[in-house]
Amino acid sequence: MKQRLVALALATLLVSPVVASDPTPITPPPAPGPPTGLADLAALRATVFGTPPQDMAPLPDKVPLIEMDLALPWARPVPAVFWFDRRLRVWLSAQKTPAPLAIVISGTGGDGNTAKLSILRAVLYGAGYHVLTMPSPTFPGFIVSASSTGVAGDLLQDGHDLYAGLQVIISHLPRKVQITDIDILGYSLGGAHAAVVKSIDAAEHKLNIHRALMINPPVSLFASVGRLDKLYAITLGLGDAGIERFYQKLYAELANLYRASERVQLDEDFLLGAAASILRTDAEFSAAIALTFRIALVNMFFAGDLYSGSGVVVDPQHPPKVGDSLEETIRILRGKPFSEYFMRVLAPYYLRRRPQLTEDSLIAENRLDVIGDALRDDADYYAQTNRDDLILDEPELVWLQNTLGPRIAVYDHGGHLGNLGDRQQVSDMLAMLSGRWMESAK
Amino acid sequence: MRSWPPETPAADNAVNLEKALALAKAASAEKSVKQAPAEEAPVTPAEAPPLETYDPWARLNRFTYRFNARFDEAIFLPVANGYRRLPSPLRAGVHNFFANLAEADSVINYTLQGRLGRGVRSLGRFVINSTIGIGGLFDVAEKLRLPKAPTGFGTTLAKWGMHPGPYLVIPLYGPSTLREGIGLAGDYGASYGINLADLYRGDQSWGLGVLNAVDQRANIDFRYYASGSPFEYDTIRFLYVRKLLIQDSSLRPPKTRDSDVPAGK
């Protein structure tokens, strides 16, 4: 009964150092494996391993870093199990002279200091920006300290929460930080958030955000998430058997590699090499990607269930206390796809708050179409994506291209964020944020 | 608001290239696994330990974990971060000094494990670094192709066939198991018994102990609850024990298939 999520954790162990910060130039030959039909092998591999070091844009030698932990005035009472998430934690890299501020928003489940944010922070700081990196509204630390609902996943509501949080943060920045202009960007789901925050600001004028850039954004949130659910179902199955098999296989391969390496310590460097030789097939990459997303979902599901009182895994009358075992909870949540979060937590919560809403209209609201006019008419919205990004389908990519026109750059390869930080992506990103993009397009 | 030592992305990026090389080696290592002789039967998926972790003291452990997280956030981590701002040659010297002291323990334990070659290597490292390396401040032996390979009493107990035992979160220290906890006590006992240069019993022993702890903390890239997740205890427990079991599995003589003990025993 206990500890079934542990399989996910092993995947984290394997995947996170790689996904996180240590891309590799080694490209093992494609191994045979059942194709998932959702993306090609190159796209999956890029998604897992990221930009190889030799393709990375030059980064500054040193980037200063300040951590800010803020208690927001509207924060709700903190449930006992979330005692450590009382304050919103964001990270600032400040220039010594007046400079524009770049606000960067993390992807699904990410905190304000992910490896991908580190790349963006370094590049932007090197280009002369103050950089403020923000957690995703789907990160548990944000849900507890900054969400007005506790139920994450609704694009507009999360955008409003981000916007409110940003106002407090910016008013609390160290006084010596002089801001000349504000731009906002984000990767993956954070890209959609960045655009929504700019559109809110266009009506409220509290921050006067200048440009917004979406990097590999979804178009329909729930369709993108559905693709990741499907990836999980295909590669790991619906029950516990699939995940147990995946865990056993990973464990055995790791143990054998370790034995052969004659190392004394099983350390991060070892894992890095191991991950590259263990994850090789289409199905293995897909499983790793699907698991990474599912881990984020487990946290979001738990928080949403607890705050909304839906009672899926948390008894609303007897919420867990510090010291209580959460093993059974993890075991149940691990098997639950996003669609179940939508049907049992997110939709009921929002339908209760806004009776005119239906499930279909909620799904429709969670498309970039809700800010479609702004994206089309306001020349300060930009996007970058890849033709082989697995969270988009063809019509969605076409919609982005039609809506943004010349203000989108579409690269042939890179999968989902697999080219973040490469020279082309970085130089285009800086051109877009500085307004030079359209001039060079002319 | 807390100011951190600056990130060094350019340097990290260079390190990536080195890691890529290590990775290529690992890939070739895997090939040698496949060509390994038949008596070194590889671990099969069926031999993977169950997903459950033996944790009969879970309630106490969870409270200790929380205590450690709070202590780390309030005291340990800020001190370690202050320490990280010191010039890196100074920190390297401190790190090497403590690593050299630990060689004595490695010599004893490699001997107890019956791995005499490694024991001699640790002894060689100790002699070289204590003399040419000026009391252990410089790791000269590393440059002479005698890389550090520390071991301890916990590993000795594993080599003797002792299982990790129940999961145990040790106050101020962190994740462990009963066996590893006994190992730590044994290692400290040995150091105290040998009392090299009176470092473990003299008046300075407390100060040195604290410096050793700060040096260790400064070299661990971990932040309690950076995950933001209420499931962090479970995740860490899983990862820690799996890592220990994989390390253990390389210590015991390889089993042959037919003498396999039924799973779970």
Image: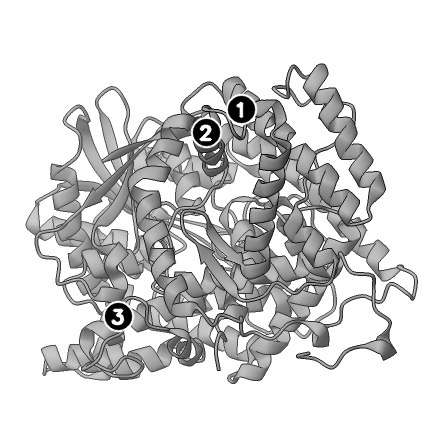
Say which amino acid is labelled 3. Lys
- Per the image, the residue denoted by label 1 is B94
What residue is rendered at 13% in x and 41% in y? A208
Say which amino acid is labelled 1. Val
Secondary structure category for the residue under label 2: helix
Say which amino acid is labelled 2. Leu
**Chain of the residue that carries numbered disc 1 in the rendered image:** B
Picture quadrant of residue B192? top right
Pointers 3 and 1 within a single chain: no
In x, y percent, where is residue B168?
48, 60
| Left or right, A75 with reference to B48 | left
As rendered, which of A95 and B120 lies closer to the eye? Answer: B120
Q: CA distance from mark 2 to mark 1?
A: 8 Å
Residue B211's tag is 2
Secondary structure category for the residue under label 3: loop
| Left or right, B108 with reference to A64 | right
- Above-or-below relation of A73 to A102: below
- Residue A214 visible in image: no
Q: Tags 3 and 1 in contact by the CB under 8 Å rule?
A: no
Q: Nearer the viewer, mark 2 or mark 3?
A: 2
- Per the image, the residue denoted by label 3 is A321
Picture quadrant of residue B163? bottom right
Q: Tags 2 and 1 in contact by the CB under 8 Å rule?
A: yes
What residue is rendered at 59% in x and 74% in y? A37
